[in-house]
């Protein structure tokens, strides 16, 4: 999903229903000049098989735009491999977007988005 961070930088975000949270690669955060914020309690990160991948000690708070969808979001900083930005299951559950996988389109038409995130009528990315 194409997104814009802090009204300046366009990135591709991976929508991952298997991800436990929202993540940004540590190098992406550095390149964007984002200021890390220390978490009160570090959070353990595990892979799909339960193997410990490390600990999350910092996050960033950013403005995320996707078409007419706009929100302030916290992104945990971790080494993500090839992905710069991952949007996980809690976000997908909260926003409940309509996804047309065959056309690679996403529409923000949930009641939550209508009341909180959409700048205009529901829009497709």
Image: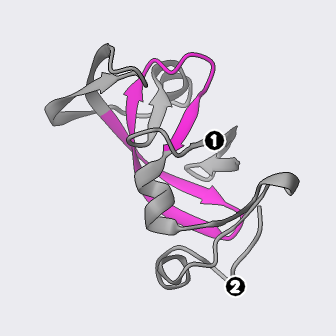
Which image quadrant for residue 72?
bottom left
Disc 1 vs disc 2: Cβ atoms closer than 8 Å? no
Q: How is the image coloured?
A: one colour
Observer-nearest of 15 and 18: 18
Residue 75 lies in magenta, yes or no? yes
Look at mark 2 in the image and give the residue it sits on.
121
Q: How many marks?
A: 2
Residue 97 lies in magenta, yes or no? no
Query: Left or right: where does residue 11 sit relative to residue 96?
Result: right
Q: Residue at x 65, y 46 (%)?
A: 8
Determine the secondary structure under disc 2.
Answer: loop
Q: Residue furthest front?
A: 49
At which x and y percent is residue 40? 12, 37
Q: Residue at x 37, y 39 (%)?
A: 60
Q: Residue at x 44, y 34 (%)?
A: 34
Look at mark 1 in the image and give the residue it sits on.
13
At which x and y percent is residue 66? 66, 59
């Amino acid at each position: 999903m194409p997104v814009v961070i802090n009204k300046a930088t366009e990135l591709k975000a991976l929508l991952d229903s298997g991800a436990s949270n929202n993540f940004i690669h540590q190098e992406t955060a550095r390149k964007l000049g984002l200021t890390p914020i220390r978490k009160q309690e570090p959070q353990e990160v595990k892979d799909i098989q339960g193997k410990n991948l490390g600990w999350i000690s910092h996050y960033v708070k950013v403005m995320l735009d996707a078409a007419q969808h706009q929100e302030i979001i916290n992104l945990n900083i971790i080494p993500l491999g090839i992905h710069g930005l991952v949007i996980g299951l809690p976000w997908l559950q909260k926003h409940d977007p309509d996804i047309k996988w065959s056309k690679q389109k996403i529409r923000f038409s949930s009641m939550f988005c209508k009341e909180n995130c959409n700048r205009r009528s529901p829009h497709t990315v």
